[in-house]
Amino acid sequence: MPDVVVYERRRAGGDLPGVVRMRRRAGGDVSLSLRAPSTPVTPADDDIVSRFLAAHPFYVSHRMGGTEFPEFTQAGLDASLRAGFKALEISVRRCASGEFVAIHDWKTSRTVPGTDYQIWNTSWETLRGLRQASGGFMRLTDIVDQIPDDVVLAIDHKTTSSEDQRNPGDLASEEALLEYLDTAFGGHPERRIIWKVFARGTSAERAERARNARNERGTREGSRVQDHGHAVPV
């Protein structure tokens, strides 16, 4: 895969190229590379979720390959995509520094024996240094940045998916997650995201309200006509 190349702009011309590398404390810096998608780019207006659900049968990589690999790790992600899965199930929790971490449990004791970190009370700087068997933790952004355009994500926001949640902090986390997904998927997360909810959960209603509000904003912003080259509110 090609390296990520940046250029230093020179006023006199002849920009200088350089390769981006990730600094490792133990040495042996890693050259970052552009990840080639395993499938062709899908037009943004395609509803990938509807296409996926219309297939019979359809298959979902639960916990991103967690049966055969440490759950929610790069190894499981790579194997799931190689195997041809078009949907990945991902549990997420927001950590103390604001990142959404892919993890099922509310603390690290099961997947990282000998530790007992509470996700909501631990920063990403700490979590990123832990090892789940053969793989480290991943953020949701790490996964989104790597998946091909025809892969669906089944997102389980653990603190609000299984009950009628009223905790302000958990609801704020859910709202932040919905906003991120809206931005990450070009204003149409419903075309790439399945919002996972259990029988007693109520987050689907909030997700639906968020989508309706987003659509209303889009309608208002789009309600303009061109008059002699000028945008005129209708």
Image: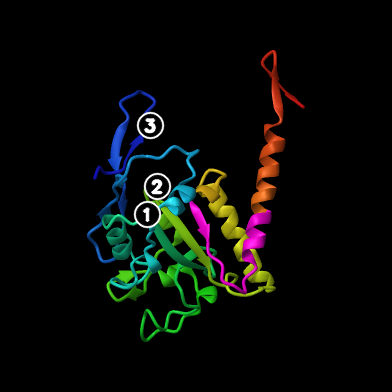
Please report the residue visible at 29 percent of the width from the left and 59 percent of the height from the top.
78
Q: Mark 1 is on which residue type? A: Lys
Mark 3 vs 1, N-terminal side: 3
Q: CA distance from mark 3 to mark 1?
A: 41 Å
The label on residue 150 is: 2
Residue placed farthest to the front in the image?
Answer: 56
The mark nearer the N terminus, 2 or 1, is 1
Q: Secondary structure at mark 2?
A: loop
Question: What residue is at 53 percent from the left and 64 percent from the top?
Answer: 196
Q: Is residue 119 magenta?
A: no
In this rendering, position of residue 167 left or right of residue 52: right
Looking at the rendered image, the disc whose residue lies closer to the viewer, 2 or 3, is 2
On the picture, is 17 further left or further right than 111? Answer: left
Q: Which residues are magenta?
A: 192-209
Relative to 214, say whether 130 is above or below.
Answer: below
Q: Which mark is residue 9?
A: 3
